Image (tube, rainbow, N blue to C red):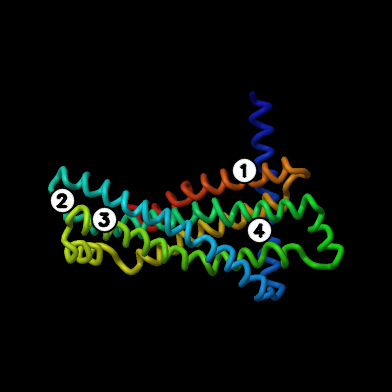
Amino acid sequence: MLARLSNSLLGFLIGLGRMTAFVIRIIKTLATTRLSSKLVIQQMYDIGIKTLPVLAAVCIFVGTNIALVGFHIFKQFGGQDLIGAYVGLTCIREMAPILVGAIMAAKPGTDISATIATMKVKQQIDALEVMAVDPFWFLIAPRIVAFVLVSPILVVFADFFCVGAAYLISIFQLKINSGKFINDMVTYLQYIDFFKGIAKGLISSLLVCIISCYFGYNSEPGPKGVSRAINISVVLESSLIVIINYFLTELMYGVK
């Protein structure tokens, strides 16, 4: 048991060291080279436009569920009119950033892992190096920049879809007064909450991109290696998004 524990700990430390070296190389590439705007724009389209329909569908139904659950909970205490404040705080502070991170891991994250891992297996990355093209400049850095630029926009859209769907359900199905809903949301929400939610989504999305690129770039040979790279990256990203969100929430909204 001790031997297995020590081997697991050693493997974790080795992996952490490799990940750190990977991130340092990304930072060095971003700091010392000029990226191709064409590559960045293409990645922004793949990450943002192609992800938006899925994000919209998920956020709409999450927003309606938040409104329904909150209404029936507050109704027990006669506070169902406060549903506007509850929806605003829940969606903008927590759910929108988490949903953006989760959808990023599920769609563009898996695409990145699969694409880079497949190129690794087919030795296309080796071919880039032979042609004196830095793989980090060509494959990884544009995706990092695209994630940084796109994720705040996706968080804003997620806020809109979540709150908008909850508003419509509250007004037309739950018969909440429209003015009361909006007034409570505006009263209890602050401008800083929007920016904190965007910061959460940005950190989660950046984490997704780095992990996806890392496991894709370091995938093992063969189809099993590609499959394993995708599987590990998605599981790790999904877990870390929830864990890091807790610490970010504690940091931003914790009891002083």
Tag 3's secondary structure? Answer: helix
151 vs 37: above or below: above
Q: Which comes sooner in the sequence, label 3 or label 4?
A: 4
Q: Which comes sooner in the sequence, label 2 or label 1?
A: 2
Nearest-to-viewer mark from 1 and 4? 1
Tag 1's secondary structure? Answer: helix
Residue name at image x 52 percent, y 67 percent: 150
Tag 4's secondary structure? Answer: helix
Residue name at image x 26 percent, y 55 percent: 169
* Quadrant of the frame with the C terminus: bottom left
Measure how far apart labels 2 and 1 are at the Cα level. Answer: 44 Å
Q: Which comes sooner in the sequence, label 3 or label 1?
A: 3
Measure how far apart labels 3 and 1 are at the Cα level. Answer: 36 Å
- Please tell me the numbered disc located at residue 65: none
Measure how far apart labels 3 and 4 are at the Cα level. Answer: 44 Å
34 vs 139: above or below: below
| Residue behind mark 1 | 231
Asked if the residue at tag 1 contacts the one at tag 3, i.e. Cβ–Cβ closer than 8 Å, the answer is no
| Residue behind mark 3 | 169
Asked if the residue at tag 4 contacts the one at tag 1, i.e. Cβ–Cβ closer than 8 Å, the answer is no
Q: Amino acid at mark 1?
A: Asn
Asked if the residue at tag 2 contacts the one at tag 3, i.e. Cβ–Cβ closer than 8 Å, the answer is no
Q: Position of residue 156 (x, y in %)?
A: 41, 66
Q: Quadrant of residue 223?
A: top right
Residue name at image x 71 percent, y 73 percent: 32
Q: Quadrant of residue 115?
A: bottom right
Q: Which comes sooner in the sequence, label 1 or label 4?
A: 4
Mark 2, residues whose alpha carbon is within 10 Å: few (<14), some, or many (≥20)?
few
